[in-house]
Amino acid sequence: MSEEKSLNFLEEIVEKDIETGKHGGRVLTRFPPEPNGYLHIGHAKSICLNFGLAQKYGGKTNLRFDDTNPSTEETEYVDSIKADVNWLGFQWDQELYSSDYFEQLYSFAVALIKKDLAYVDDSTAEEIATAKGTPTEPGDPTPNRSRSIEENLKLFEEMRAGKYPDGAKVLRAKIDLASPNMHLRDPLLYRIKHIDHHRTGSNWCIYPMYDFAHGQSDAIEEITHSICTLEFIPHRPLYDWFINQLELFPSHQFEFARLNITYTIMSKRKLLQLVNEKHVTSWDDPRMPTISGLRRRGYTPQSIRHFCEHIGVAKRENNIEMSLLEFCIREDLNKSAWRRMAVLDPIKLIITNYPEGQEEFLHSENNPEVEGGEGSRDIPFSRELWIERDDFMENPPKKFFRLGVGLMARLKSAYIVKCEDVVKDEHGHVCEIHCSYIPESKSGNDTSGIHVKGTMHWVSVRHALTAEIRLYDRLFQVEDPSSEEGDFKEYINPNSLQVLENAYIEPDLANAKMGENYQFMRKGYFVLDKESTPKHLIFNRTVTLKDAWVKLKTTL
RNA sequence: UGCCCGAUAGUAUAAAGGUAGUACAACUGGUUUUGGUCCAGUUAGUCUAGGUUCGAAUCCUGGUCGGGCAACCA
């Protein structure tokens, strides 16, 4: 008997609505991005919520681009958004655009004017702002508030016809200039923008504001549950007001707390700034919290979906620890990624009693997490190997289970070796490690009777491939960059990217394919970068493995 | 100092008046040819003051703290 999983507050609402037969028990949600940037993991939360709710309750989800501001919106963003939603594993019912409704929205505005609930205002932006008052003081009407319906109708038509320049006039709702809710103090409905729109071209020179487009779009599509983030709570009375005054389908808005993650930012505006000012290379830079960045970094759709389930949904502000995201990708990749060996910071190890020129192939399973190991590959072994520099210490502490003069350790899938001696360069740095190997300790049929605590990865010098490896770390040095004083960019981590030009990787990795995740044993999960070529292999580190030694080391 | 939203371990999230639970993180120990995984365990929480009640994280009142609200952005 498994315990029933508890519902989040939105699931509770939907279940209640189905129970009471609201909208005939129908569930239709929508994901409404503005095509002015790339999707990030905060959007993933919203996507999982909207599509997940519909999936769970037998409904559907529309993808609707909220494209009412042509000065920031582009087709490039539309394409990336569609690709990202699909990649995350979701299929929308209809692909729609707020701009599809421009004609209808225009007639809604006319209807409002005819009810004397909207007027054309010639005031400047500043005049309107000051006349709105402050949260503690009511606003004052501007001179145009009392225009006749006929004059408003004529002026609005002329606005549409292009008779006035940008900013000369706006259409405002006539609601309540004294409302304690600032959004009800005669909000703007339409503004003039002589700019081509990515879909409607030059058909329009007036464009509706968010508040006059979003709710009505929901109503037109008969969205049953319109889910958005907390900052839209004060807009809800306005959302309802338009629907009531225009007598439209009663869509309802529900709000949840947006996702924040430590050591990164989630604002599209700020992310765009990082791109434009070259703090990162692009929207899909693997350090970015964008879907495309995470994808390039090696995150899987499943791990992101799982993350979104883990974090839950509520109305309280939150700042999720990055370690939870990392847990989710490790959990996924541990079960699925094939193991390979790669030496990131190499030092040469010579097996003095292994015949020169000899080589053999050793078997190593692809995935120890799965019964049968998902097969194995043969790894070439020879007298000279690369091992990790920090797998050797000149003065090893007691709990160091790797190499130091006199110490023994196992080479993964190969033999136990004993460190006999080291060679130093002119600066006194160790540049070669000399070992003897124990022939009877061969992996798979070890008759040596020797037990060692440490196992190390390695690559045969003669057979190794060279690769560039990019190590990523958190983008910011502080938990919450946007709450710190000053510009958020002051808190960028200068070491968020470390490039290793000369790593050595096992030959089988020549077969690595884009989108295939590997575990480089003892080092982390890695994936081929899109800039990689057969002649110049490039791997991105998705995430490190958990490492008990780094912690132990610091306490010694 | 107007209106709105919120407050449960370090971080999130449950408990719909009846044993404060789960995950991540942290810490112990065990297993291990990855110092990974896995397994077992430990630490740690109801913002505050009153009230209602046999019984309050939950209901009521006051306070405190955090966030939001005035863009021709969404």
Image: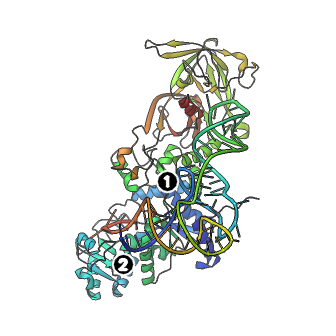
Pick the front one: A368 or A80: A368
Local SS, label 1: loop
Q: Which amino acid type corresponds to the residue marked 2 in the rendered image?
A: Ser
Q: In the picture shown, does residue A312 fall above or below A153?
A: above
Residue placed at 65% from the left, 63% from the top? A6
Amino acid of disc 1: Asn
- The dot on residue A471 is none
Q: Nearer the viewer, residue B65 or A424?
A: B65
Q: Residue at x 63, y 64 (%)?
A: A7
On screen, A73 above or below A477? below
Q: Is residue B8 above or below residue A181?
A: above
Location of residue A97 in the rendering, given as x and y in whole percent from the top left corner: 44, 68
Q: Is residue A15 left or right of residue A280?
A: right
**Percent x, y for residue A273?**
35, 51
Look at the image and tell me whether residue A420 can be seen: yes
Q: Residues within 10 Å of mark 2 (few under 14, many from 20)?
A: some
Residue occupying the point 54% across, 25% down: A390
Dot 2 falls on a residue whose secondary structure is loop
Residue A436, image x, y percentages:
64, 14
Q: Which of pointers 1 and 2 lies earlier in the amino acid sequence?
A: 2
- Quadrant location, the C terminus of chain A: top right
**Tag 2 residue:** A179
Of A451 and A218, nearer the camera is A451
Q: Which residue is mark 1?
A: A319
Left or right position of B19 against A243: right
Give residue A209's position: percent from left, percent from top.
36, 71
Q: Chain of mark 1?
A: A
Q: Quadrant of residue B16?
A: bottom right
Q: Viewer-proximal residue, B19 or A487? A: B19
Q: Is residue A335 above or below residue B70?
A: above
Mark 1 surroundings within 10 Å by alpha-carbon count, few (fewer than 14), some (14 through 19), many (20 or more): some
The answer to whether mark 1 and mark 2 are in CB contact below 8 A is no
